[in-house]
Structures are given as C-alpha cells and as structure tokens.
Image (tube, grey):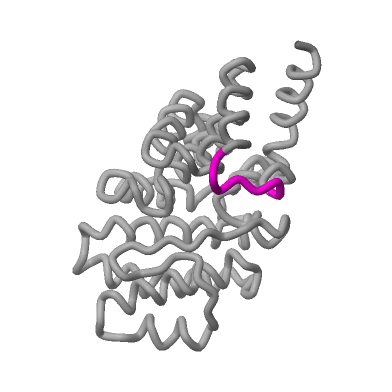
Amino acid sequence: MKWLRLLPLLIVLLICGCSAKYDLPLYEYEADGVVLWKPCSMAQAEVLSNSSKDKDVLQGAACSAWLLESGAVKKADYAKSSQLKLEKYLVKNKQSGLGHYLLAYLIAKEAQLAPMKGLDLVPRMEQEALAASKLSPEVDHGGPDRFLGELYLKAPSAPISIGDMDNALEFYEKAVKVAPDFAMNRLGLATALLEDDDVKEACVHYDKALHSKCFDEKLLKVDSCKKLVKACEGKKAAE
C-alpha cells in the first residue's frame, strides 16, 4: 500500500530529473559569484564542498546539483551527502536564499532516486523552497517559485501530502512575474491552468512560452507538457 501511495510522487519533478531523460538544455545562472548548471566533476564538487570559503561551499553544492541533473551521478546517497554539507553551511548562513534553493533541489533528487522515501521528504522540500522563495525569488530565473509550483501541482493532495492546485497556480504566477521570458515558468503555469480546466488561459501562456528568448522545442517532449501541446495546438487548428 505504501508503494501505491508513492506512485503519484514519481512524476513530481520537471524541476529535476528531466534534463538527462529528455536531453533538455540547462541554462547557466550566476548568483553572487556562484554559477548554477555549470558542468563540473565529482572531484571538483568534493574540493569545493570541503572548502572553508562560503562561496566555494555553495559552488560545490551547485556542482553536485549539476552532476545529479545531468545524469552523471545517479545515486541517492550522493544527493544525501551533498545535503549534509550544505546544511552545515546554512546553520551559519540562514539568510542564503541560494543555499536553501540548492538544498531543496538536492532533497528532491534524493526523493527521485530513492522513491520509497519520497513522500517523507516532501515537507523538507517545501520548507527549503519556501525559504528560498522568500529570500531570493530571482534565483535560477524564478527557480524557487517554479519548484514550489511543480511540487504543489504534482504531489498527492491532503491528507496524503501537500498537493494543492491553488498553491500551484500562485507560485507559478510568481515565477512568471519574476522571469516572464523564461519558458519553463510559462509552461509550468500553462500546465497547471490546463489541469484546472482553464484551457484558454493555459494556451495564452503556452503561446508566450513558444516565443520566449530561452524556448527550446525539447521542453515540449516532457511528459507533463504533452497534454498541453495537444490541447493548445488542437485549439489553434479549430479556430
């Protein structure tokens, strides 16, 4: 029975895990000298994470995130150990929005790679992402709010977990406000609107995503976007 309850969580993450599967682009993002989604090695991550310099620790966590997202590393234990080093940093740097965002991401990767633990990890994902949203909503092109939108959209609803359509729409809208020209924000909001049976508004954001500066057709290959593409392209054909 526990396995059946966990099944809905396995599709939670457009936010992580899809890049390797669908060969999606990863857009480098710099925040206070730390570069997200920059290719690196496990050796580099280890050296940076064990440094006494705060910026190095964050870059080490960012490196670990890239290794997991790219598929270079596929071990839940690695995601877990990377969290531990970042948690020590956050004890001294509670106001680091980037640190909280990276921790939420690494927890999500652990959940993806060890799905039997996934449901139990959702509250920690939410807690860290909410902190990141409050402190640094601009990070990773609205990443914290995009993360929360996806989490609330795909997680099982109460009483099993925290899934909530109103929250999903709220945070996707925040992500779009922060970075309106970032295609993943628009596509996420469009997907949520479609699930909420608002086809017209969903297709408005779908069309805007197609014309955004960072749009890549590979984004439409993601399972969560296929229904959106069918609905909006069908709507265009019928007009």
Q: Position of residue 60 (x, y in %)?
A: 41, 76
Residue 120 lies, with reference to residue 77, above or below; the image says: above
- Asked whether residue 189 is in view, the answer is yes
What is the total number of numbered labels drawn onto the structure image?
0
Name the residue rendered at 25%, 60% in the picture. 96
Q: Is residue 193 left or right of residue 94?
A: right
Q: Nearer the viewer, residue 133 or 86?
A: 133
Q: Main secondary structure of the magenta part?
A: loop
Quarter of the image with the N terminus is top right
Name the residue rendered at 55%, 43% in the picture. 184
Q: Position of residue 16 (x, y in %)?
A: 57, 55
Name the residue rendered at 56%, 28% in the picture. 205
Which residue range is magenta in the image?
212-218
Q: Position of residue 112 (x, y in %)?
A: 61, 57
Residue 198 sits in which quadrant? top right
Asked whether residue 216 is drawn in magenta, I would say yes
Asked whether residue 87 is drawn in magenta, I would say no
Name the residue rendered at 45%, 23% in the picture. 166
Residue 7 lies, with reference to residue 69, above or below; the image says: above
Q: Position of residue 104 (x, y in %)?
A: 42, 56
- Asked whether residue 156 is in view, the answer is no
Q: Nearer the viewer, residue 147 or 158?
A: 147
Quarter of the image with the C terminus is top right
Q: Which residue is at the far top?
A: 239
Residue 131 lies, with reference to residue 39, above or below; the image says: above
Q: Is residue 53 left or right of residue 142?
A: left
